[in-house]
Amino acid sequence: MAVIVKKLYNSGKFLYDMKLVAGEKGVSNLVQWVHIVEDADVISFLHGNELVFTAGIMGQNSEWLLKFTQSLHQAHASAFVVNIGPHTHEVPKEVLNYCNEVNLPLFTIPWKTRMVDMTRDFCSQIMKEEQAVQTMATTLKNIIFNVGDRESQIAQMERYGYLRDDQYCFVGVRIESLESADDNQEKAIRMMGEKIAKSRHETFVSFLYQEQVVFVLTNHEPTDIEWFISEFAKAVQNKFPSLRYSIGISPSQIGIGKQNGNFEKMLSAVDTAYRRKETFLYYEDLGIYKLFYAIKDKSVLRSFYQETIGKLVQFDLENDTNLIELLQVYFKNNTNLNEVSKELYIHRNTVTNQLKKIAAITGQNPFEVDGKTMLSIGLYLKEMI
């Protein structure tokens, strides 16, 4: 977890006379740590997402700061601070222009301000933020899964700014082979979500649950949630263009102590999206799957499937037939035999005979309302089983 640049700036401008002089559009960048760097060769050792301080002690000519800035950007630094004084008298215009171009926040502080005091303060804020986020993630999971005393946990959430009557939305991201993914990939995914969310709202929690990275959006309007999903998808595409993932979005629900059911809705949405190979899916758009996920005894669903479509799947495997495909096309075309015939390039009588065979195998007549209903539900369950 990290602190956004803007939050550090808000405290630094009053305590340390910190001034933002360029790169304002990047103030939502995340800062994971703070460093003082004077030797440009050291920049290559940065991990990224650092706030860097420099006084320019080793600057030997008028061009050094521009090269220094370009190196920071290439190293994915979040922002940097120049200590104006005997070593760096002013920030050149070309440096300001470059920072505005690449959205790299550039700050200045007067020589009287001690960089060591600022770095100690900012590092302390980052550590406190990380501890708070971890505490909130654990507490929220305990509330969701009914672990411990709920009232004391809700009170703890409120101490950190998460009120009991706030509105919560869960966004689950299931990544293909997440268990085998390296830590850097999972960390990058969570950082993307955090950066996007915190650019609009201060409160943010994320945690891992089974195969999902879970983002918790607090008091987000529907348009904010849509924007978050869109921006997150763009960020993942840019960073990991070949990554397969699916996003499930719960409804927004009021009441921190009433989120266990809402969390389950997110899991239902992300599970369905992953099975369908869709990029994202809102719970409200699950349709009939809402009923399936609401049934706690999944053996009922498996039994229903086996008594209908399961028999057909087995027949296709044993006899090298495509009756499942024909049935799917039959329902897709609203049981219009002529349309099925055209799409599959077979005679209408062949379609009729195949449907009769399906009736014989499954015991469900696809020409009658009850049979259509049973087989249609069975096909929906096929995506879940």
Image (spheres, rainbow, N blue to C red):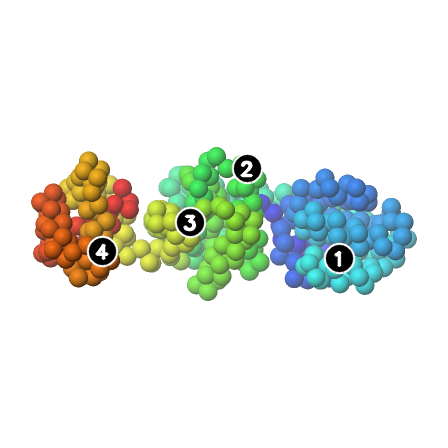
Q: Which mark is residue 328?
A: none
Asked if the residue under mark 1 is in contact with the one under mark 4, i.e. CB atoms within 8 Å, the reply is no
Other-residue count near label 2 (Cα within 10 Å), few / some / many at <14 / 14–19 / ≥20: few
Q: Which amino acid, mark 1?
A: Phe
Other-residue count near label 4 (Cα within 10 Å), few / some / many at <14 / 14–19 / ≥20: few
Q: Nearer the viewer, residue 201 or 26?
A: 26
Say whether disc 4 or disc 3 marks the residue closer to the N-terminus: 3
Asked if the residue under mark 3 is in contact with the one under mark 1, i.e. CB atoms within 8 Å, the reply is no
Q: State the residue position of label 1.
A: 107
For discs 4 and 2, the disc positioned in front in the rendered view: 4
Q: State the residue position of label 2.
A: 183
| SS at circle 1 | strand
3D distance between C-alphas at marks 4 and 3: 34 Å
In the rendered image, which quarter contains the C terminus? top left
Q: State the residue position of label 3.
A: 246
Q: Position of residue 254 (x, y in %)?
A: 39, 57
Q: Which amino acid, mark 3?
A: Ser
